Image: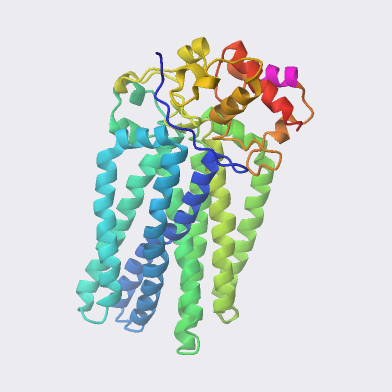
Amino acid sequence: MDIIGQFPLFYFPEYGSAWMMGITGTIHILFSHTSVGAAMLFAFLAHKAYKENRSDYYPYMKKYGMFLLIFSYVLGSITGPGIWNTATAASPRGISALIHNFVWVWATEWVFFIYEVIGVFVLVYFIDRIDRKTHLKLTYTFALASVGTLALIIGIISFMMWPGTQAFYATGSASDAFFGINTFPHMFLRIGFMIMMSGVIGLVISSSMRKENEELSNELSRKMGYISIIGGFITLFFFIWYMGTLPENAHAVFAFSKDAIIQNRIILTLVFVAYFAIAIIKPRWINPVIASVMIGVILISGLWSGEKLRESMRKPYVAGQYIYSNQIISRDVPGKNIKSELPIIAEKGLLHLNPFVPARLKTITDENRKDAGELLAKMACSNCHSLEKTGVFRPLKDRLTGMDKEGIKSILYAMGEGAFSYMPTLKLPETEYDAIAEYFASLHY
């Protein structure tokens, strides 16, 4: 019996399977993205404290470090496994591809991460027990380990968008996969955002110190304002570069909401710059409540919208532009001895080739056509789209409203011919097209 290496279907109603991975990933990034910027900020503050003999900086660093320890490392470590769980369920072949390409890169990243975790404990709990020069050296190594962790992970995440050249497909080399054309702009884009977030969080700590030492509180608030502005402009600059390194399908998706995204980014930039300018000019106006609210505003409006955009632009692929989001291998990768599954699917169909399809649905009949169509729709479409009328992310109701069965089939035929760069080119047997169309038509979008 012919089969392809599919896994059991993970289907999440209303949201779609892949979006659960995006949501859990964003929650994790919410915590972890504060760590690298904070590590660099620690190095900067420790350098200033040591060179200028500013012993008053150390209590601030200790408070910041305690916040970082709980917010980034405890909560980040708890939510990290959540990504692995949802990613393995929603995109097993995507995760498999990343592990097979980057197993030693990931192992190296874990070495850096372990050093980070030990380092943050040492910096927080031994700040008053070790000499200042030793503390300074530790902050430098802590910052290097944090940036190293980011650099290694970014190479993997960037590969999920695309390798950027044809070399990887021929060689299968980890270096050709890792050093894609968007790896470095992506990394510096993230670093800019992390620097900005380190200043934003720093404003919470500095504003809470006003009753203890108002002069120091105002001084540090101003510094955090400058740091946040610098990080914000680094983010904008590298975002423009990053967008220029993306594949055609990413730009096709971006074009759908380009005007709204640009308008949203302009508004957010103005709001953020105004907030940071207030921190610089009128630091007394910033209090812990306002600063805490702004953490939420910046993380949700900046981080969630950015992650959602990246997740959208990667479609229809989940890794390396050779694995579709629906787990089908769409092209040959000679360097990995991987063959495209599209020809055999076009010939024999998904129902026949997927080993987890129930026996009663292997052959489409008049009695099971709608059930077969529902299963096919979930297998082929649910990793990008929510299928229900009440669907939240990329609901198909927005694209198929008012269409009859023949109209839906015409879209499926066009998709099979590669008419949409942002949709998987997936040709199916006529009977499977018919079953999918009948199922969608029965929903009466």
Q: In terms of depth relative to the viewer, which is nearer, 394 or 206?
A: 394
- As drawn, the residue found furthest toward the top would be 347
Q: Residue at horizontal 50%, vertical 73%?
A: 203
Q: Residue at x 59, y 63 (%)?
A: 297
Residue 237, x across and y down, in percent:
51, 48
34 relative to 6, above or below: below
Residue at position x 35%, y 77% from top?
62
Q: Position of residue 222 (x, y in %)?
A: 50, 74
Residue that sits furthest to the bottom in the current view: 212
Q: Position of residue 129 (x, y in %)?
A: 22, 81
Tag count: 0
Relative depth, front residue between 435 and 24:
435
- Decide if residue 402 is on the left or right side of residue 9: right
- Write down the region rendered in magenta: 405-411
Mark yes or no: residue 414 visible.
no
Colour approach in the figure = rainbow
Instruction: Please tell me in which quadrant of the rendered image residue 124 appears.
Output: bottom left
Identify the residue at horizontal 50%, vertical 74% (top origin). 204
Instruction: State the residue lying farthest toward the right.
Output: 402
In this rendering, the answer to whether 144 lies above or below 53 is above
Q: Quadrant of the N terminus?
A: top left
Q: Please state if 118 lies on the left or on the right of 415 as rendered.
A: left
Query: Can residue 432 be seen at all in this image of the molecule?
Result: yes
